[in-house]
Amino acid sequence: MTSVKFPNKRMSSIKMSGGIREILSRANELEKEGRSIIHMEIGRPDFDSPACAKEAVKSALDSGDVHYTNMQGTEELREAVAEKYRRENNMQANAQRSVVITNGAMEAITASLLTILDPGDEIIVPSPYFSAYADEIALTGAVMVNVPTSMERGFALSADDIAKAITPRTKAILINTPNNPSGAVLTRGNLEEIAALAISKDLLVISDECYEKFLYEGEHVSIGSFKGMEERTVTVSAASKTWSMTGWRIGWAVSPEEMTPYLNKCHQNLTTCANSFAQAGVAAAFAHADGDVKKMIAEYGRRRDMVAQWIGRIEGFEAIKPAGAFYAFPRISSLNMDGFKFCSWLLENAGVSVVQGEVFGAAGHIRIAYCREYDYIEEGMRRIKEAVDGLRAGSRK
């Protein structure tokens, strides 16, 4: 028997329960028992990956492209990423000096955090935030400083609120637009104010832009495109959501040239390199799959409109109409139940699996993913309304 005790200090700061996977696990158990479950918890697109990407993978495998690649990523894919950011995002991305291909966006963010932060440093993260951020920051030994946003203000991020959270230990800001879980999109004005603050306080910015293609209102703006921000911004994205390639695990970071060698070294020691033939498939998607993305955007927009209509009919739910991504984030606090209790009750009683807002740093909300088939989602919303109506009727007796 070993005398080493688990968890160590680093892992003891990470919650081992109460997350998305816990509610998903219970939903899967109920399904195995024969229950009809509507899954609206996981942000996993229901579309197939582009045919051109799959054909490129087959070709790569047939030609023996099954070995290590350049640790930074294949030249073909790095060039495709750099060209996209120059053309669409108005950024001066260089394939050799600023692009690193990673095993999904999560690795890109983790490697960026490890490269930037020292133990005890502070990083500002607006809430609601993607649930993995807290764990990734904890692994670095840094401190996450939460800056809440509110539904009343459309989850807009105020530079004034960020400024109030800055201390001598603050090293970076982590932003996410379009936002998971709220669907909010930071405006050009929001981002200009944040950029000015970052420059004046000499802070770095990590910008998670994984949902940039799924925009229904306004425009997507990369903070790294502003004057003075290229040398202090890491822009992160992935193929996962853009082309429905969540299992391919290909992401990337566009980083300041001074940082890139160290980011790449961190990536190399985490995972060596990204999958060789998957990189070939994603390069093909960059070249030939714009039509696939347009079809997904149109369908997600249709689903968004339907979900928003249903939320408006549910007494006790309040929400903004999401401008991007594929999530709704209604407030349920008037039901007098915390998020985990409500989500567990909804799963057991209505067979609908959604995620409590506490996972995203926003108590009193739930996240509803609308990335499954239209009729499937509508059935889930019908069940939610029926269950909540029954709950409220019972409380009035």
Image (cartoon, rainbow, N blue to C red):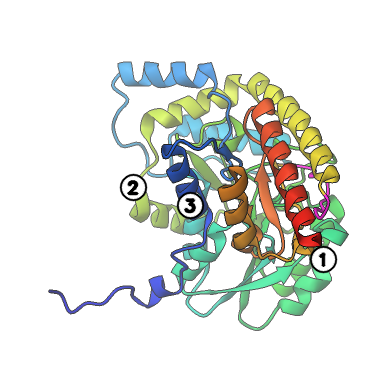
The amino acid pointed to by label 1 is Ser
Q: Residue furthest left?
A: 1
| Closer to viewer: mark 3 or mark 1 | 3
The residue positioned 80% from the left and 58% from the top of the image is: 155
Q: Quadrant of the C terminus?
A: bottom right
Q: Are marks 2 and 1 in contact (CB under 8 Å)?
A: no
Residue at the limit of the structure toward the front, as seen here: 397
Q: Is residue 169 visible in this depiction of the protein? A: yes
Looking at the rendered structure, the kind of residue marked 3 is Arg
Q: Quadrant of residue 64?
A: top left
Cα–Cα span, label 2 and label 1: 39 Å
Asked whether the residues under the numbered discs 3 and 1 touch, taking CB atoms below 8 Å apart as contact, a structural biologist would say: no
Give the number of the mark in front: 2 or 3.
3
Task: Write the start and end of the magenta stretch as one range.
Answer: 315-324
Mark 3: few/some/many CA within 10 Å (<14, 14-19, 20+): few
Is residue 304 shown above or below 389? above
Residue sticking out furthest to the bottom: 168
Image position of 86 with respect to 227: above or below? above
Q: Position of residue 378 (x, y in %)?
A: 71, 32
Whether the magenta-drawn stretch holds residue 70 is answered as no
Local secondary structure at mark 1: loop
- Residue that mark 2 sits on: 272
Q: Which mark is residue 21?
A: 3
Q: Residue 183, percent across and down? A: 74, 47
Query: Can residue 225 be spotted in the picture?
Result: no
Return the mark for residue 158. 1
Mark 2 vs 1, N-terminal side? 1
Residue drawn 58% across the image and 22% down it:
287
